[in-house]
Amino acid sequence: MNITINNIEVWANPGETVLEVAEREGIRIPTLCYLKGFSPTGSCRMCMVEVEDQGRLVPSCAFPVYDGMKVKTNSPEVRRARKTIIELLLANHPQDCLVCIRNGNCDLQSLAAEYGVRSYRYVGQRRKGKLDLASPSIERDPEKCILCGRCVRVCHEMQNVGAIDLINRGFNSTVAPAMDRSLNTVACVYCGQCIVHCPVGALREKSDQKRVWEAINNTDKLVVAQIAPAVRVAIGEEFGLQPGEIVTGKIVAALRRMGVDTVFDTNFAADLTIMEEANELIERITQKKTLPMITSCSPGWVKYLEHFYPDLMDHLSSCKSPHEMEGAMIKSYYARKMGINPEKIFVVSVMPCIAKKFEAQRPELGKEFQDVDAVITTRELARMIRVAGLDFSRLPDEGFDDPLGESTGAGAIFGAAGGVMEAALRTAHYMMTGKDMPVIDFSPIRGLQGVKESTVEINGIKLKVAAVSGLKNIDVLLKDMQAGKSEYHFIEVMACPNGCINGGGQPQPSTPEKIQKRTEAIYKIDKRLPKRCSHHNQSIQKLYQEFLEKPGSHTAHDLLHTHYTR
Ligand code: HC0
Ligand code: SF4
């Protein structure tokens, strides 16, 4: 069918919305509540357009096209309506942009600037709400909420958790957990997807920046930082670089200039995780223990399983997540090697994830000492780099410290969904046959689909594997397991859609284009490395020789494995 937008005839498919057609034609219509791929609510009305042949304004995100339709996206009526909507939103919004976490990166602030809002036109009563600071990962400020409902749709439709919803009526409507309780008292899994999709500052991570600066300034502490696989392909966006630009060396340089004493790589521990996890998988298969084994490195996923399928906890790999393994090795192997009292070591993990903040505090992780002392997100590190006055893009590329800084391509691909599985298969093949896989790239479990599956034959055993990301995608597989119908041997689950590259602590906003670029960069790192299998990592080999003996040893179990008991 043909429609006219701003006097230009364009084609459209039946069922498309005005917003979708306009987007395709390169005509920008501002939105706040709209979320591509989710059910439209039309609640904010920011995307108003004028339908000339009907003489009325309609929300373009929820209005389907029809043949012969005549639309204006930029008439005086449209501009006036949008400006009024912004002014009404501001009337019920705290006037504290200068001290807001989203200052400079807020959709409402940008629209107010774009539409020339120069005063608070409507003055009246503002909705009150209590700050929710109780969880270890997320802070909520309901007074900043503009009721767009993006977080609610993400939590329900993408993550299948439903920890938050619109509660109350009329002027008192607000987004909160049931009974207006704190997030830490409900089944929130701290994936942080609500934060990355919030257009304003109503949701934010619990910041650990202050604690990290204090540790850096404390001359009695040795501050050891580690960087997660997905941070290096995303943080550049915070400094105007292209999504997917690989800036590993600049992050290392920045941390050293900020005063961090030693910089290690979580990718090293990802290789270590693979040694332990591949060994565990083989043990479960040969000793006929609980299968399928499911990965345990995504703390949002672990929490989801605990809340919703506690009967399936035995399927979870006993391996700690890589950054926890790295912390454990820093405070044992490295501390001993260097003759440092582990109590004086402060381990800070730079992660794309906010659930890692919760994970680091779990009593199941760390016996004598907490493995990791603080977790900061990609966004928090970017803020700290700015405060330190560093010109990020001009920093030189520096290398990690030894011995917990060497990594292979297998460790690198942990950052993309399917990567843990692929890395584990590379090493499981070696452990079972004594030979490397003839083809290292395992394409069936690459790509941006929520569920990827394949069968791989090793030593006559047909291993059925799946990689799942985005929590709503896991339920079918879990229900099959409960019914005793699952045919899988090994399943990777990442709480966030597409894995850590799209974690709740990554630069905002998150868009499909950015996710694609970050994923490509992760596989580029793997491809470029001379060693692409965890068992070829020489520092890992040395760690086993000098300290851990072999995968699954008593010491390995003591330091690298855990059992979640909720
Ligand atoms: Fe991930 Fe990880 S890969 S969870 O996605 O397994 O956060 O990047 O650091 O620990 O290595 C996040 C990313 C990590 C851990 C690793 C795993
Ligand atoms: Fe829902 Fe995840 Fe946000 Fe918790 S962190 S409210 S589970 S989207």
Image (cartoon, grey):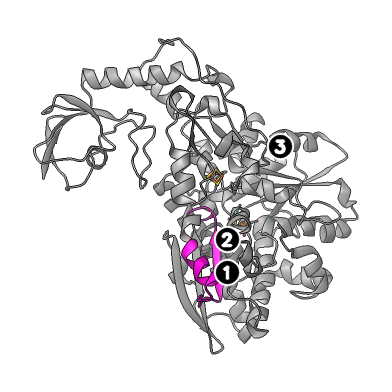
Disc 1 on helix, strand or loop? helix
Q: Is ligand 1 closer than 8 angstroms to the Cβ of mark 2?
A: yes
Residue 440 x/y as whole percent: 51, 74
Q: Residues within 10 Å of mark 1 (few under 14, many from 20)?
A: many
- Marks 1 and 3 close (CB-CB < 8 Å): no
Amino acid carrying label 1: it is Ala
Whether residue 52 is visible: yes
Q: Quadrant of residue 494?
A: bottom right
Magenta-tinted stretch: 474-499
Whether residue 243 is visible: no
Mark found first going from the N terminus, 2 or 3: 3
State the mark number for residue 423: 1
What separation in Å lies between label 1 and label 3 (alpha carbons)?
33 Å
Is 306 situated left or right of 565 in this image? Answer: left
Note whether 198 is above or below 459 in the view shown.
above
Q: Residue at x 51, y 41 (%)?
A: 194
Residue under numbered circle 3? 258
Mark found first going from the N terminus, 2 or 1: 2
Amino acid carrying label 3: it is Met
Mark found first going from the N terminus, 1 or 3: 3
Q: Residues within 10 Å of mark 2 (few under 14, many from 20)?
A: many
What separation in Å lies between label 2 and label 1 (alpha carbons)?
8 Å
Location of the C terminus by quadrant is bottom right
